[in-house]
Amino acid sequence: MTDWKRTERRVAAILGGQRIPITGRARGSAPDVDAGWLVVEVKHRRRLPGWLRMAVAQATASAAEFQLPVVVLHEHGQHHANDLVVLRLRDFVDWFAN
């Protein structure tokens, strides 16, 4: 089994969902993981960008008890409504999936 398939299965298990096999689906026709109220697209990379990992570490270090550490990614010239919010999976599960 490939690393990305294994990663999709692990994420599905963590979120209480099911991995949707790629066979027979077109890009965007179904998510990697269906977890009920969540539609999850999983991206597996050998290494994430260092600046992104540092941003998450900064947010985590700055968060007090009962605060959710997130990173907002904004692309120059774009509307803020399209910004991306990044957080650790463990924080997401603690706040939203339990």
Image: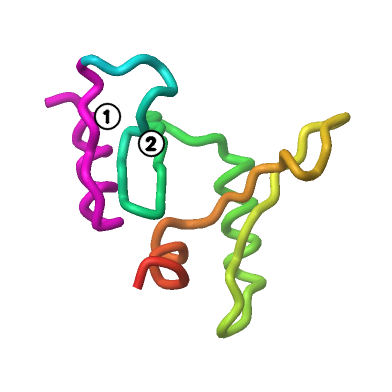
Select label 1 or label 2 by which is in front.
Answer: 2
Give the percent coordinates (x, y) of residue 43.
41, 32
Q: Is residue 1 left or right of residue 39?
A: left
Going by the numbered disc 2, the residue's amino acid type is: Val
Above or below 63: residue 57? above
Give the percent coordinates (x, y) of residue 88.
47, 57
Residue hosting label 1:
4
Between the residue at mark 1 and the residue at mark 2, the CA separation in whole angstroms equals: 8 Å
Going by the numbered disc 1, the residue's amino acid type is: Trp
Above or below 55: residue 9? above
Q: Is residue 44 left or right of residue 54?
A: left
Asked which secondary structure carries label 2, the reply is loop
Magenta highlight range: 1-23
Q: Nearer the viewer, residue 86 or 31?
A: 31
Residue at 40%, 42% (x, y): give it: 40
Q: Residues within 10 Å of mark 2 (few under 14, many from 20)?
A: some
Give the percent coordinates (x, y) of residue 91.
46, 66
Q: Is residue 15 magenta?
A: yes
Image quarter where the N terminus lies is top left
Q: Residues within 10 Å of mark 1 (few under 14, many from 20)?
A: some
Earlier residue among tags 1 and 2: 1
User: Is mark 1 in CB contact (under 8 Å) with mark 2?
Assistant: yes
Residue at 88%, 29% (x, y): give it: 77
Residue at 29%, 18% (x, y): give it: 25
The numbered mark at residue 42 is 2
Q: Nearer the viewer, residue 63 or 41?
A: 41
